[in-house]
Image (spheres, rainbow, N blue to C red):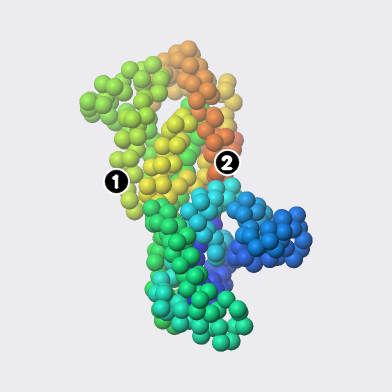
Amino acid sequence: MLNIALFGPPGAGKGTQSALLIKKYNLSYIATGDILREEMAKKSPLGLEANEIISRGGLASDEIIIQIIEEYLKNNQTSAGFLFDGFPRTYIQAYILDGLLSKIHTSLTCLLSLEVGKEESMKRLLERGKTSGRNDDNREVIAKRLIEYDKKTLPVLGFYKEAGVHAAIDGIGTVDEVFNRIIDKMDLALSKSQMNIVLFGYPGAGRATQARKLAEEFGLVYLATGEMLTAELEKKSELSKVIEPHIKEGTLVPDELIVRLIEKKIKENPNSQGFIFKGFPRTMVQAYILDGLLRKQGTRISCVINIDVPILELVRRLDERGKTKDKMPYDVSTQTIVKRLEMHEKKTLPILKYYEKSVKVYHVNGEGTMDDVYKRVIKPAQETYRTVH
């Protein structure tokens, strides 16, 4: 989904630009003030609660705002995305928005900040006051609103600058001039969109074959930790001395080592269309690490595809593989095969539950020929591609 937060001081022209963005990108408009007033008019439980607070001169709490926005997000997912006007207004709300979007398996694409000086803002609002009839369009109130914007809202920009999704827009000029600048920034933000897939499945599920085919189909960088480790062994590098005992015994290689290899691979491909991860993450710790590595690049996991194969079929496949040149060290006996499968179940399956809270997880039947399975695997990948792009 395409999700935009539109920022700018009072008088920056957010309303005008919002209308243009909504039309161009087919977005649903979320202005917290408007939604709150709708709930109050409907006299919904949340609306009544908010009305009671506001009637006493207070402000609707984050808890109320969150529930209203969450409900709106759930009920408006047929559009291409959302445009947020007036939210988030604080550093805390920035974290809240991240969580709300994660619940519907998406994230903020970019924050557009309309840059307009205080004198220009004051001039515009005073001019608007001549015809708007708004009692807050006077010099004293405008000055307070501008101070409030600097105090509470500007720190939010820092939050999104750190995340790499902030775009400053010169807000001076005609409506069309400003809009064209916004489109330029949007084109840049959309060009950075990556599709990052984690391909799950027990050893023997055929992940390597399917991952390579998906990588070729969508122009992704194939990242397989097992193959990266094997390459180190073949080079007889210093790292191979640490890796070899784990590979032979079928135990997990230390995270510190794996992370160094993955981080290097990601840095080597800064302009890729995305990555497909096979064999990583294998533990909850690695799942958190991968999230952190991708956030540093301003991206995230797009979806998880899990290839399901019955256990007895897996044992049969791995036993057969052990008789070929493609055998893995743990394919040498039924005992080591079972040990590897047990380890996967104990350490890796909980990661699926972790991802189910933040991204879409697809379960695909892994039985049949490689082509049969690929026909099933490519469908969620295609759906994800349309969502990302």
Q: Judging from the image, what secondary structure is the residue with disc 1 in?
A: loop
Q: Residue at x 22, y 27 (%)?
A: 237
Quadrant position of the N terminus in the picture: bottom right
The residue positioned 38% from the left and 53% from the top of the image is: 162
In the figure, is residue 11 to the left or right of 293? right
Residue at mark 1: 268
State the SS at label 2: loop
Q: Which sits earlier in the primary sequence, circle 1 or circle 2? A: 1
Given residues 301 and 86, the one toward you in this image is 86
Tag on residue 100? none
Task: Between label 1 and label 2, give the one nearer the viewer.
Answer: 2
At x 34%, y 53%, the residue is: 271
Task: Characterize the local packing of mark 1: few (<14), some (14-19) or many (20 or more) Cα atoms within 10 angstroms.
Answer: few
Check disc 2 and give the amino acid type: Lys
189 displayed left or right of 33: left
Q: Could you tell me residue 117's position as x and y percent?
A: 39, 74
Q: Nearer the viewer, residue 161 or 153?
A: 153
Is residue 385 at least partly visible in the picture?
no
Viewer-nearest residue: 259 or 308? 259
Coordinates of residue 202 in the picture (x, y in percent): 51, 28
The x, y position of residue 20, in whole percent, is 53, 74
Q: Amino acid at mark 1?
A: Glu
Name the residue furthest bottom: 130
Q: Which residue is mark 2?
A: 357
The vertical placement of 375 against 61, above or below, is above
Quick one: label 2, few (<14), some, or many (20+) residues within 10 Å? some
Relative to residue 386, is residue 353 depicted above or below?
above
The x and y percentages for residue 206 are 48, 32
The residue lying at 47 percent from left, 65 percent from top is: 149
**138 or 220: nearer the eye?**
138
Q: How far apart are the alpha carbons under marks 1 and 2? A: 30 Å
Instruction: Name the image quarter holding residue 43.
Output: bottom right
